[in-house]
Amino acid sequence: MPPPRSPWVTDRDLALFTDLYELKMMRAYRREGMGETAVFDLYVRELPESRNYLLACGLEDVLHYLETVRFHPEDLAYLAATGAFDDDFLAWLESFRFTGDVWALPEGTPVFADEPLLEVVAPVPEAQLAETFLMSQVHFQTVAASKAVRVVHAAGGIPVVDFGLRRYYGTDAGMKAARAFHVAGVASTSNVLAGAVYGIPIAGTMAHSFVQAFDEEIDSFRAFAGVYPDTILLVDTYDTIEGVEKVVELARELGEEFRVSGIRIDSGDLVALSFRAREILDAAGLDRVGIFLSGGLDEHRVAEVVESGAPVVGFGVGTRMGIPPDASALEIAYKLVSYGGEGRLKLSPGKPILPGRKQVFRLEGPDGRAARDVVALHDEEHEGEPLLALVMEGGARTAAGRSTLEEARRRAAREIARLPDRVRAIEPAAPPYTVEISERLRAAQREVARTAGSR
């Protein structure tokens, strides 16, 4: 018997990381001789009430998948054993390669409802297979980046650190969240593997368990500072103010050798405690010791701290950034909009589709800020900047598809700065950002709807 498959997903497993119906449809397409070019749009139907915009993220993993997805012998053996696929189809899968094109919003681009995050243009069986992986990666990473950018905005330039690895939904989510957060402007992560893989700065202090392991709180401070002299000490394990006073005691004990850079407060009234801690530290001549806050933070709590003027130098934000309770899922869809050169749509209530290949144009106002977007057919000419770029052609990345993580991060900062203040704010924008559908695209939608189902 072959060895059991590992539950850890690697590049070698990606072909089977799909929903069964994708493979069933692929076999049926093959049997019917349907291999013409299809266009699939990946887009969000509507923004969550708590989001004024989303931040596109996940494209790097999409392109890597499309470049590398292969059906290996063990994959084909498993599929054969299901009895759902014949030998001819399995032989075709053995030589499967993605040969299509991808148009996409570069990572770090603000995006709104009904705008394609990406378009896959490929023979229909190839484009169909891509659905599951593309949706899973773009959805999660866009959710994470879109939350993180709100936290970064609320922090007003005070560094934000990703502290949530232990509570995210599995290893892949922890890795992809750290990357998405960095695109959104988060300064560093506690995730050591993300630092090694992506080059993201890593950061970490100490846990309450270290303090608890010692009989005396000050002994834990003394021990940790002995190993890491410029560390941040966690002071709220027992009584926060007493913890701060023990840091002062340690400073007196060590004299010029005292190099502790900060304290961390993880619970309680963070604003009041940070003000009181600052008073104690300053009175002891420890004005260079900063105050770092964590514990149940999100953009609203961070904004409250910043608006209070609390003397803090950093925020550690975890669960609510990687698993945002206010918008943990998007109305994301991957829909066929063209096949064989003809527009396609569905007429299901509440789920309209705009047919055909598209382009998104971003127009500026007199102040140089983004004023409105226009979603148009791909061959239309409009004022403004076309946002969808050809990132993959014939199954290979183009130069536009080789953007680095740091380029995506810089793009996000630049493009977010172009948005109107009301859209960048964490409060609901009034009025919302304007997205128009071009008249030609609306006319195409009406025409395709008129003939849908009658071909």
Image (tube, grey):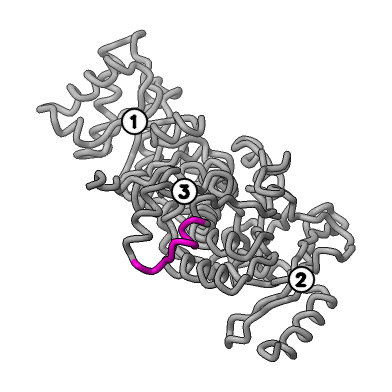
Residue designated by label 3: 305
Q: Position of residue 429 (x, y in %)?
A: 64, 67
Residue at 49%, 48% (x, y): give it: 70
**How many angstroms separate mark 1 from mark 2 (CA)?**
57 Å
Side of 450 where 174 appears, left or right: left
Residue designated by label 1: 205
Residue designated by label 2: 341
SS at circle 3: helix
**Residues drawn in magenta:** 83-91
Judge whether residue 118 can be spotted in this image. yes
Quadrant in which the C terminus appears:
bottom right
Residue at 76%, 62% (x, y): give it: 360
Decide: is 139 above or below 281: below
Residue at 47%, 32% (x, y): give it: 197
Does the stretch in magenta take in 376? no
Decide: is 125 above or below 172: below
Judge whether residue 271 can be spotted in this image. no
Amino acid of disc 3: Val
